[in-house]
Image (spheres, rainbow, N blue to C red):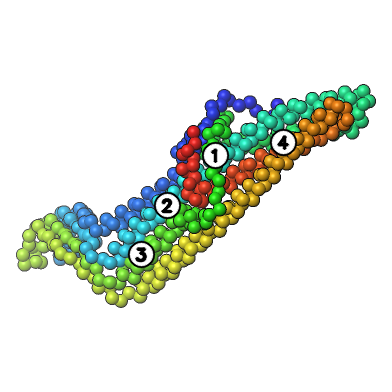
Amino acid sequence: MLGLPRLAAEPLPLKRAVELALAHSTTVAAANADQQRVFASYREARNQYMPQLVVGSGLGKSWGFPLSLEGAAPSVLNVNSQSTLFNPATRDFVRAARTEWSAATMQTKDQRNQVIQDTVLSYAELSKWEGALSHLREEHAAALQTEQLVAERVKEGVDSPQMQSKAHLSSARLRLRLAEAQGAIDVIRSRLAHFTGLAAASIETTPESIPPLPEVKQDDLSGQAVKESPAVQAAEIRAAAEVFRARGEHRAILPSVDFAAQYGLLAEYNNYDLFFKTFQRHNATVGVVIRFPFFNLSQRARADAADAIALKAKKDAETAKNQVSEETLRLQRSVEQMAAAREVADLEYQVSQSNLESLRVRLDAGSIAWHDVQDAREQVNERYNSLQDANFELARARITLLRARGELEAWVGGSQ
């Protein structure tokens, strides 16, 4: 027998396969982690308006005048607080971080749609090969019987040895197709196992759980795809974030105001009473720090670089829109072509079946040789394989188009 025996498999509906893939996907997990990172960056920028409190100590012995320790007077206890009150640059940087968070959210959605598409296509392909495998086994069994019959006829002198070689070739072709089918099934089951976290041997599709694919309307789908595409939305939002960031770099040369406060508990052994007219242990300072960075050539250069980055992000967003529009139009036209190819394959299969039935009737009447029927049977098998391939390619194009239109997850949700 071809293939290894499998463990008892429980049917896996399409909707359940997608749910498991989303739960186990490393791609989705990485996208979620990146989204959390960007959100943390946004909170970091926003919290600059919240007071920051630092408590510490600068203990030390003084000889002579009490010098500072790392810029602060020696103290038993030191409490510092600082926060931004007015800073145009920080305000734009916060807006940029918040916008970047929105872009990361859309990027996560796009990665999620990619996982759904990969799972659905793998599931549909596995279902196709599982259906073809039973058909191929039946045809292979029939070919082996025919080969045995031909061997007897050759032995009796009814047919030539060439007929035996031809019958053996037919069986060999079916064995090759069986090996291809079994190999494809094993590979796709392994892929779905990685997606879902299930054992490969336990995966078995249920074709009835795949919802009917909607017909593709000959509308302007490119505009809808551009509007619904998370990748395009992420690129546009990211471009807006870069504009905020560039504006923040320009505003970094504007005046800013910070709140600052400090409390220090001084020690008596640091000679403060010897060098200062009055001395008290408890000291505090509260006020604002005003800065006028009116001349900073390095910051101006950084702002110019930020402008270039923002312009590049805008162009990248335009490129993403053009790519989605062109790809959607290509898919739309591809669906039309594949639907026509599928119709041709179906008609060819029907014609070959009718021809086979006609030849069988003539064989019973004794007007043709049996090998004519065998040739017709091989043609039916070829037409059947072509029809199955055409059906899957059409389904692949329609599923990809559903994702482009933002309807893939809703379509999967309608499965049983």
User: On the picture, is 65 further left or further right than 358?
Assistant: left
3D distance between C-alphas at marks 4 and 2: 43 Å
In the rendered image, which quarter is residue 238 located in?
bottom left
Q: Is residue 4 among the parts visible in the rendering?
A: yes
Neighbor class of circle 4 (other Cα within 10 Å; few <14, some 14-19, many 20+) is: some
Picture coordinates of residue 378 (x, y %)? 78, 35
Q: Nearer the viewer, residue 263 or 33?
A: 33
Q: Is residue 166 above or below residue 222?
A: above
| Residue hosting label 2 | 106
3D distance between C-alphas at marks 3 and 1: 45 Å
Of the residues shown, which amino acid type is indicated by label 3?
Phe
Q: Secondary structure at mark 2?
A: helix
User: On the picture, is 327 further left or further right than 278?
Assistant: right
Q: Is residue 2 above or below residue 338?
A: above
Q: Residue at x 58, y 25 (%)?
A: 7
Of the residues shown, which amino acid type is indicated by label 1?
Pro
3D distance between C-alphas at marks 4 and 3: 59 Å
- In the rendering, which numbered label is found on residue 177? 4
Picture coordinates of residue 355 (x, y %)? 78, 36
Of the residues shown, which amino acid type is indicated by label 4?
Arg
Q: Which mark sits nearer the N-terminus, 3 or 2?
A: 2
Q: Is residue 324 among the parts visible in the rendering?
A: no
